[in-house]
Image (cartoon, grey):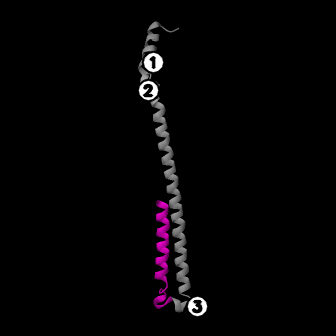
Amino acid sequence: MTQPADRDIDAMLGALLAPPEGAREAGGDRAFLARVDRAIDVEAALAHAERRFWRSFAFEALAIGALLTALWLLSSSSLLAPLAGPGQWGLAPPLLLIVALWFGGTQRLRQV
């Protein structure tokens, strides 16, 4: 059985810890929760976009490495020696420039 003093303390604590009347009427907690939920959703979308960007960056960098390796192997063959020019890299700089511009352009379009 609770004592009258205990009931008074419970009522006093309940009144002190209750949210303010204006917040209940205006829905302040709901607006705050909605803002927090939107911020969490935006942060999750940004993290997903960043993961997608880095994944595509890694695959395209790997593809460029494979193209350069293939170019180096083909330019050292006797069949393509006339195209390779002096030092076996006569064809490589223009192709490397084209690949680098393509790579830079695709990554820039993904950032926008």
Q: Which residue is mark 1?
A: 14
Q: Which residue is mark 3?
A: 79
Q: Which residue is mark 2?
A: 23
Residue 84: tell me if it is visible.
Answer: yes
Separation of marks 2 and 1 at Cα, in angstroms: 16 Å
Q: Is residue 108 above or below residue 44?
A: below
Q: Amino acid at mark 2?
A: Ala
Q: Quick one: 64 or 26, which is closer to the camera?
A: 26
Q: Are marks 3 and 1 in contact (CB under 8 Å)?
A: no
Q: Which mark is residue 40?
A: none
SS of the residue under disc 1: helix
Q: Earlier in the sequence, mark 2 or mark 1?
A: 1
Q: Earlier in the sequence, mark 2 or mark 3?
A: 2
- Which contiguous range is marked in magenta? 84-112
Residue 96 on image: x %, y %: 48, 78
Determine if the magenta segment contains residue 111: yes
> What residue appears at the point 47 percent right and 81 percent down from the top-left corner?
94
